[in-house]
Image (cartoon, coloured by chain):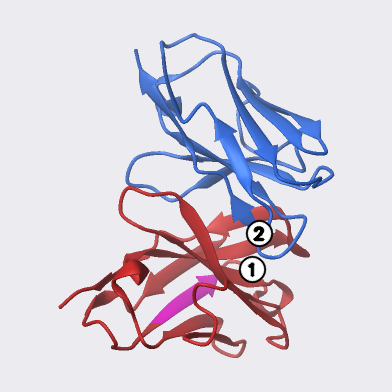
Amino acid sequence: EVQLLESGGGLVQPGGSLRLSCAASGFTFSNYGISWVRQAPGKGLEWVSGISGSGGTTYYADSVKGRFTISRDNSMDTLYLQMNSLRAEDTALYYCAKDRASGWRDGFDWGQGTLVTVSS
Amino acid sequence: DIQMTQSPSSLSASVGDRVTITCRASQTIKNYLNWYRQEPGKAPKLLIFAASSLQSGVPSRFGGSGAGTDFTLTISSLQPEDFATYYCQQTYSTPPTFGQGTKVEIK
């Protein structure tokens, strides 16, 4: 069974930094691309960033490009999101979402999320 | 970016009702369209992939159709756990984008 367990969320001041982690199990981690998708309180879903199985290709939404960095450690079956220069509008529940197949064409399997609050 | 527009944004229905939700893409996405259900306080769950393929373990009351720019999710007989928010997602181009959601409420 696929399991994705996010951690690292919390309260941070505007301009601050935070690193999220997603520990994976139940599948061969290096075979799948994984994304971060966020959901602001009471709002819809927004894809944030994705990374290929090897880690060699990364993708970012324009809203976070230059501030967030996605990475993965395939020896530890763990995905990361380094978030810098955080803004109030980055406040959201951040989900780790695994490609169901080769590439994200056929959708995602989801973790339970970790909450990031950016506030002074 | 490809914009996805769902309608309606919300609807009220009763257990046993047939419900239809539509999703329109701002440009053609062939059949690169997925549907999710998000129950309150839970993560999204994949229902339909590739516009019309039922995800394993998902009840057969869920059905998807469409291609190009216009897509439909149908729930043939609404069950209590189906009172939730539904999202469409295009995966034709990067970034993958979601519709704004359709909230299905109890009448």
Image mark 1: chain: A
Q: Identify the residue at horizontal 51%, vertical 26% (top origin).
A: B8
Image mark 2: chain: B
Residue type (three-letter) at the residue carrying disc 2: Pro
Q: Identify the residue at horizontal 64%, vertical 34% (top origin).
A: B23
**Position of the N terminus of chain B by quadrant:** bottom right
Residue A29 magenta: no
Tag nearer the camera, 2 or 1: 2
Chain coloured blue in this rendering: B
What is the count of numbered marks?
2
Q: Residue B70: percent from the left, percent from the top?
A: 74, 32
Query: Magenta residues?
Result: A20-25
Residue type (three-letter) at the residue carrying disc 1: Phe
Tag 1 residue: A27
Q: Identify the residue at horizontal 40%, vertical 21% (top origin).
A: B80
Where disc 1 sits, the SS reads loop
Tag 2 residue: B96
Q: Is residue B67 above or below residue B92?
A: above
Q: Is residue B5 above or below residue B3?
A: above
Q: Is residue A49 above or below residue A72?
A: above
Where disc 2 sits, the SS reads loop
**Position of the C terminus of chain B by quadrant:** top left
Relative to residue B64, is residue B13 drawn left or right?
left
